[in-house]
Amino acid sequence: MAEPKANELMEKIVSLCKRRGFIYPSSEIYGGIAGFWDYGPLGAELKRNVKDLWWRRLVHQRDDVAGLEATIIMAPQVWKASGHVDTFSDPMVDCKTCKGRFRADQLAETPCPQRPSKMVSECHGEKTPPRAFNLMFTTHVGPVQDDSSLAYLRPETAQAIFVQFKNVLETSRQRVPFGIAQIGKAFRNEVTPRNFTFRSREFEQMELEYFIKPDEAVEAICGRVATPAGPGHPGEPQPDWGWQMWHQYWVEERLRFYESLGLSRDTLEEYWQKPEELAHYARACVDILFKFPFGTQELEGIAARSDFDLSQHQRFSGKPMTVFDEELKNAWAKLPKEKQDALWRRYFEARRAYLTRMGETAEQAEALARADADGLAKGWYVPHVIEPSAGVDRLILALICHAYSEVTDTDTKGKPETRVILRFHPSVAPIKVGVFPLLKNRPELVAKAREVRDLVRTRFTVFYDESGSIGRRYARQDEAGTPFGVTIDFDTLGETPALKDTVTVRERDTGRQERVAIAELTAWLEAHLR
Ligand code: ATP
């Protein structure tokens, strides 16, 4: 069957999402609100599965990552220190003809509201020069609405991790290298929300801040700093890994995560940001992109952010963000003098460069950097960080786009009928098992089917359905992405004695059917739902 055109395909996906209860426009009965979306019954399950899988893999299945759940509104100084108050903005232009507001860097991809066949860059409306538009939503805390009560809805979950770094370190008994993970809402007043949920104003992030030793500390302890030998997963973490190894490790770990959800490598792309695209504090950043119908776009960014974030909070809060590393202290004492001097100087230069960039006077930067390098020699440093930062909603959209497929069957009268199958990987599928009595007007079938439903739902999400022909019920579950359908028929009741207490299990993607004993059903499903 011919591939539907990209925008046609997106229209079908948007309408399926609404019709089947994956995603609805927020506040739809009032006409909706641009950039806000609600997840319906199937969408809520899908989202929960994705977040659980991320959490399980990053927090539960590792010894070196601890979880955090912080508030959405934080002290406004957090956003001053992070740079968001001053620089978290997009360039915006106004069109004097249609009065529309657009992102200056996206005019070539945004349809003109008055002439949708033309992009804003090509339409004739005169545009204002670009102005910086800060993307943070503001609010006021308490009853007085003035500058002193101004607060922000967080535009990312990451900053809370930095702000709580010391508390987590002290209470979790972790030691660098270790990570802190958080899932939660983030808000950005995007100038032009678009591509369905891809660019929303309220969305969820899954972020990990993985804290590592500065390379100078690694070198002092191990006598060398390992760097990547080539592409691919570098294997189990080692004590001599520098930031480049850790960065590559996290890029590969994250790619494996996407693969485990069914997004094979050929649906993804890695984009290594060019030096001129990097934020001033970042040493490297890789975007993991997914091939959406509307283009290949970012799902997640994995940035090596140096020690910028903790250093900023140290300067703004006046609270030390340094950690003490006994191993470093002992190793340093044993280094030859020239090695100590070389490492001291490298650390000093890096700290001085950062402090100077942040606006400290030359003298102040020199004095502070000297103190930092002296601290390193005694075992103290501000950890560096690798940040894999993913958007939940973009991943949900990628999973739906990837799962979407159409098949054409012929109905009983020989007429072709096209229907949708969502081929979700079983681990993310909102409903794992459909349970169906063959006929709803046979109480013994219904009773048995309910028994099976109750058994299966102790372990898996189940949808019990007794209405309509069995074919229609299968089709409804195919469209919801349910991997398996279990049918209770007369053989289950013993019509064919050898088949008593067995059920038919139908596989969504192949339509293949297998007879499974009820006593073995949960174990069978367990094995097949991985
Ligand atoms: P973009 O360049 O697409 O605006 P970004 O580089 O600003 O994204 P980050 O600040 O790195 O994004 O945020 C990390 C992740 O959060 C992104 O990879 C994306 O998955 C998600 N995200 C960011 N902005 C949005 C948004 N407006 N809607 C949905 N998800 C978002």
Image: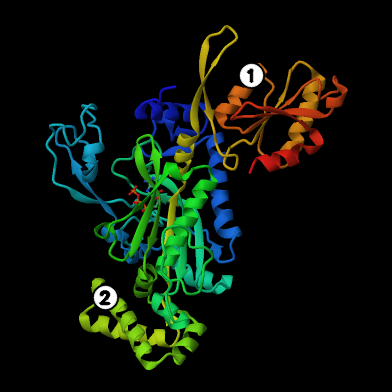
- Image x and y of residue 523, in percent: 75, 42
Disc 2 element: helix
Q: Quadrant of residue 75?
A: bottom left
Q: Residues within 10 Å of mark 1 (few under 14, many from 20)?
A: few
Judge from the rendering whether residue 438 lies leftward or rightward of residue 343; answer left or right.
right
The residue closer to the viewer here, 315 or 530, is 530
Residue at left 13%, top 33%? 125
Mark 2 crowdedness (10 Å alpha carbons): few <14, some 14-19, many ≥20: some
Quadrant of the rendering where the N terminus is positioned: top left
Q: Is residue 258 above or below residue 239?
A: above
Quarter of the rendering containing residue 87: bottom left
Marker disc for residue 330? none
Q: Position of residue 262 (x, y in %)?
A: 52, 42
Q: Which residue is mark 1?
A: 471
Q: Is residue 413 in view from this perspective?
A: yes
Q: Amino acid at mark 2?
A: Ala
Q: Nearer the viewer, residue 182 or 345?
A: 345
> Where in the figure is residue 85, as x and y percent of width and height?
30, 59
**Image: 307 above or below 115:** below
The answer to which of marks 2 and 1 sits earlier in the sequence is: 2
Q: Compare residues 508 and 433 and report the one nearer the observer.
A: 508
**Count of labels shown?**
2
The residue drawn where x is 70% and y is 39% is: 525
Question: From what the image shows, is residue 519 above or below residue 408?
Answer: below
Q: Which residue is mark 2?
A: 353
The quarter of the image holding the C terminus is top right
